[in-house]
Image: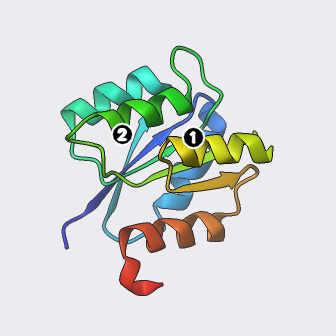
Amino acid sequence: MSALTLLVVEDSPLVRQLIAFTLRRLRDCRVVEAVDGVDALKKLASERIDLVITDINMPMMDGLKLVTHIRGNARTKDLPIIIVTTEGAEEDRRRGLALGANAYIPKPVQPSDLLKTITSLLDPSRN
C-alpha cells in the first residue's frame, strides 16, 4: 500500500499541529494542512488525499460546507471524512453525519480515538 495522505482542516494553528502530530504516529502517512474550507478545496484539487479531518467552525468556509462540497464532487465524493469539533451538541453531530461525514469526534481529541477511527475508515478489515 502506498503512503496515505491525510488532510487536516483546522483554523487554529495549535490544534492543527496537535492533530498533525498525532497523525504522524501512523506508518506511511503524509499530513497536508489547510487553514479553512477554501484552502482545503484547493489542496483537494491539487493533491491525492485519502482522508479528510475537518473542524466545523472556521472562517471563509466552515467544515459543514466543506463536507457538502467534497460529497458533491465526483472525484472526492467517496473520501472518508472525520469531523473534529467543539460543537458537541447532538444536533450538530447529526447534521455533520447527515451531510456525509463518516465520523464525528468531539474536542479535546483523544489521540487514541482519532487513530482508531482513521484506521477503521481506511482499513475496514481491521474492525
> Percent x, y for residue 32?
37, 42
Image mark count? 2
Category of crowding for the residue at label 1, using alpha-carbon neighbours closer than 10 angstroms: few (below 14), some (14–19), many (at least 20): many
> Percent x, y for residue 14?
65, 37
Frontmost of labels 2 and 1 is: 2
Does 32 sit left or right of 23 as displayed? Answer: left
Does 127 sit left or right of 2 as displayed? Answer: right
* Residue 39 sits above or below residue 14 on the image: above
* Residue 48 sits above or below residue 60 on the image: below
**Which disc number belongs to residue 78?**
none
Which residue is rendered at x = 49% and y = 59% of the image? 23
Which residue is rendered at x = 20% and y = 41% of the image? 75
> Percent x, y for residue 97?
57, 49
Does 5 sit left or right of 98 as displayed? Answer: left
Residue type highlighted by circle 1: Arg
- Contact (Cβ within 8 Å) of mark 2 with mark 1: no
Can see residue 56? yes
Can see residue 88? no
Along the viewing direction, whichever of 74 and 118 lies nearer the viewer: 74
Image quadrant where one finds the N terminus: bottom left
Instruction: Say which residue label 2 marks.
Output: 71
Category of crowding for the residue at label 2, using alpha-carbon neighbours closer than 10 angstroms: few (below 14), some (14–19), many (at least 20): some
Give the SS element for disc 1. Answer: helix
What whole-number distance in Å separates the C-alpha atoms at marks 2 and 1?
23 Å
Give the SS element for disc 2. Answer: helix
Instruction: Say which residue label 1 marks.
Output: 16
Which residue reaches farthest bottom? 126
Q: Earlier in the sequence, mark 2 or mark 1?
A: 1
Which residue is rendered at x = 80% and y = 43% of the image? 89
Which residue is rendered at x = 21% and y = 46% of the image? 48
What kind of colouring is applied to the model shown?
rainbow
